[in-house]
Amino acid sequence: MDEDFLKDKVAVVTGANSGIGKEIAFALSASGARVVIAARRMDLNRKVALEIEQETSNTVLPIDTDVSKESDCKRLIAQTVNCWGRLDILVNNAGIGIYSPIEELSSEDFDRLLKTNLYGTFWCSKEAFRQMRKQQQGGYIINISSVAGIEAWAGTAAYSASKFGVMGLTKALADEGKKYNIKVSAICPAMVATPMTGVEGEDYIQPSDIAQTVLYLLSLSGACWPTEIIIPRKGAD
């Protein structure tokens, strides 16, 4: 693929001020896209935006966003379009992890996880889909899911419920988007070395692996319509 194959494309990445999201934002900007850093903690958003701009020489827009709030998701897409006039790519990356036996899982934690992982993906996708449809030039929505959205294990009731929901949403929207040339895919990695997971080292999938997978999806021709890419970890049970 060309180094700047995303030139003039506008991309929103949620949860983009650390971990996987930050790596994705860097990769998109390095490929020519105008990127929105959407996350909580505006001070960190600005810091990451500046880092990316200095590295890639492309403009980056930081927007304070809590995807667990529908109003923030609506404002995110509206501000993006108001600034750059369009939206071509949405990467729903923001997410949290809560792991515990079902009897120890509070309704508050369950609700908080669903609001961030599932509702946030739904709200952002809904607004992005509407904007892409209006533009009549297609688009791409990429959801960062998990292998826990395909198979569940003890202690992952809340997390897996949210990610199974993301997978259902992805496949339904992918079918709905065919009419408008709006692609929708999910990337489903095993354990990734990030601050959220607390693991590190070469034995784990790296954020850069996910970023490269995003670029791969965006480079495919219009004839390709993948709904999911599963990334297992070597040696994992």
Image: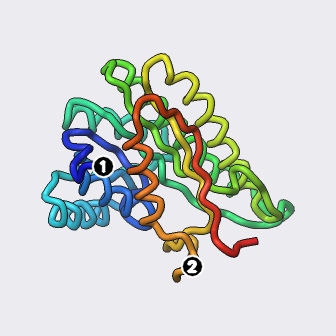
Name, please, the residue furthest toward the bottom.
201
Residue visible at 49% across and 70% down in the picture: 206
Q: Which residue is mark 1?
A: 1
Q: Quadrant of residue 189?
A: bottom right
Percent of width and height locating residue 208:
42, 66
- Secondary structure of the residue carrying tag 2 is loop
Q: Is residue 103 left or right of residue 141?
A: right
Residue visible at 54% across and 70% down in the picture: 205
Kindly identify the amino acid type of the residue bearing the numbered disc 1.
Answer: Met
Percent of width and height locating residue 42:
30, 59
Q: Which quadrant holds the C terminus?
A: bottom right
Residue visible at 43% across and 46% down in the picture: 91
Is residue 203 or residue 114 the one in the foreground?
203
Which callout, 2 or 1, points to the residue nearer the camera?
1
User: Up-down: is 146 above or below 223?
Assistant: below
Q: Is residue 43 left or right of residue 148?
A: left
Is residue 110 or residue 197 the one in the foreground?
197
Does the residue at mark 2 contact the one at mark 1 (Cβ under 8 Å)? no
Kindly identify the amino acid type of the residue bearing the numbered disc 2.
Answer: Val
